[in-house]
Image (cartoon, rainbow, N blue to C red):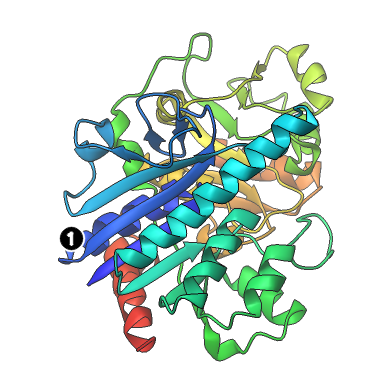
Amino acid sequence: MKIAILAHGYSGATLPLAKHLADKGHQVDCYYLCWHGASQMESMEYGRKMSALRIAHRIDCHNTLYHYMSRNVTVRIIPLFNPNNKVGRCRMRVQNGINRVHIQTVARQITHRYYDYVNVILYTPYDLEILKRLVRRGVKCCVSYHEVMADLTRDSGLLDVVVHANRLHTPVVVHSQKTKADLLRLSDVNEERISLIHFGRFESFTQYGEGKTVDGVGSGYLLYLGFIKPYKGLKYLYEAAQRLSHIKELRIVVAGGGYDPVIDEMRKDGRFVVINRFIDNAELVYLMRHSKGIVCPYIGASQSGLVQTAMVFGKPIVATRVGAFSEIIQEGVNGYLAAPADAAELAKAIERLYGNSITCLEELPHYLDWDAIAEQYLALFRSME
């Protein structure tokens, strides 16, 4: 079977899928859209900055990715100009024109390589445009949604790309009961078209070994890792820490780009280390390996790849009961759960983590095992005949 996977990001969840499909004897080609000038995405380094002046960059076997990846997998990077960058009107027209040419070329290449099935992980208008072109040309496609909601903190409806893609009547893959429920509640998609297939551990992070040293963090800390925005609930993490003065060993590292005013207060608190910048893959691995556990105090979410990343390093999770956290985290087994926007309950969950020795599950549930996940995708593909 010849399979293509196309996504804008989401490489942490798709590279292991590609590997396990390839290990079963199938040829898998991954096409990843990225922004012009990027040098990496989740769990994957490109080796150089990608230029949108070239249509596609093939990651060759000398890349560290192939310390993990099967030789039956090919990875291609398609850089696009970011439409959100502020440039002059004339330059924007030129960049938009280049993006359109790249999208047309990618759709044509995928069509002419005669894949048996194409899985499009849909999130941006560019993914949608490629999907439309493939469907019009008779290519057998299924769509995967990591996100369907326009706003994760309130019931604001579906993303526009989801609404438009639903009209194509392709098979749909979602990765949590929460996402499936949102899609059924807010659209007229027939439930028979929806397959619930979870994703497993983000295994491709293992290519980074011990990672790259991050100075000033030490070890044994609670780690918040990711984009810093108010909806991530850092305000409640800070308030929870004020309730835990009796835990003398409590230290919290907050690492990521973005901004929330509460990090200014964290910097004044000696128990916090704030690293307010982009964290690359090798640094992420180091921070994970040296932490005591991971904290996700989110106010809203669908599912977070942080849980599947933490599983790679055997780290327990403290998270709120939003999105799919309660579907993956087993209380007292691989983590603890708290109500969202509730500092008191979050503090109790952190206290339980410090008072107990737990690690991530050694034997994963069947639905989180990549071999079983690959079989679910193959069954879906065969059903598309």
Task: Label 1, secondary structure: give it.
Answer: helix
Judge from the rendering whether residue 146 lies leftward or rightward of residue 181; answer left or right.
left
Instruction: Tell me the quarter of the picture where residue 139 sits.
Output: bottom left
Residue 369 in view: no
If the image is split into quadrants, where does the N terminus sit? bottom left
Q: Name the residue under label 1.
A: 23
Instruction: Tell me the quarter of the picture where residue 324 sits.
Output: bottom right
Judge from the rendering whether residue 152 lies leftward or rightward of residue 43; answer left or right.
right
Amino acid of disc 1: Asp
Q: Where is residue 350? Give x, y as percent.
A: 63, 39
Q: Where is residue 121? Give x, y as percent.
A: 51, 61
How many numbered circles are shown?
1
Judge from the rendering whether residue 331 lies leftward or rightward of residue 274; answer left or right.
left
Q: Where is residue 88? Give x, y as percent.
A: 78, 27
User: Residue drawn 70% across and 30% down?
Assistant: 91
268 w.r.t. 287: above or below: above
Residue 221 in view: yes
Judge from the rendering whether residue 242 lies leftward or rightward of residue 131; answer left or right.
right
User: Residue drawn 45% across and 32% down?
Assistant: 40
68 w.r.t. 217: above or below: below
123 w.r.t. 54: above or below: below
* Callout 1 crowding tier (Cα within 10 Å): few <14, some 14–19, many ≥20: some
Q: Where is residue 330? Give x, y as percent.
A: 51, 60
**Is 136 in front, or is 213?**
136
**Is 362 in front, or is 283?**
283
If the image is split into quadrants, where does the C terminus sit? bottom left
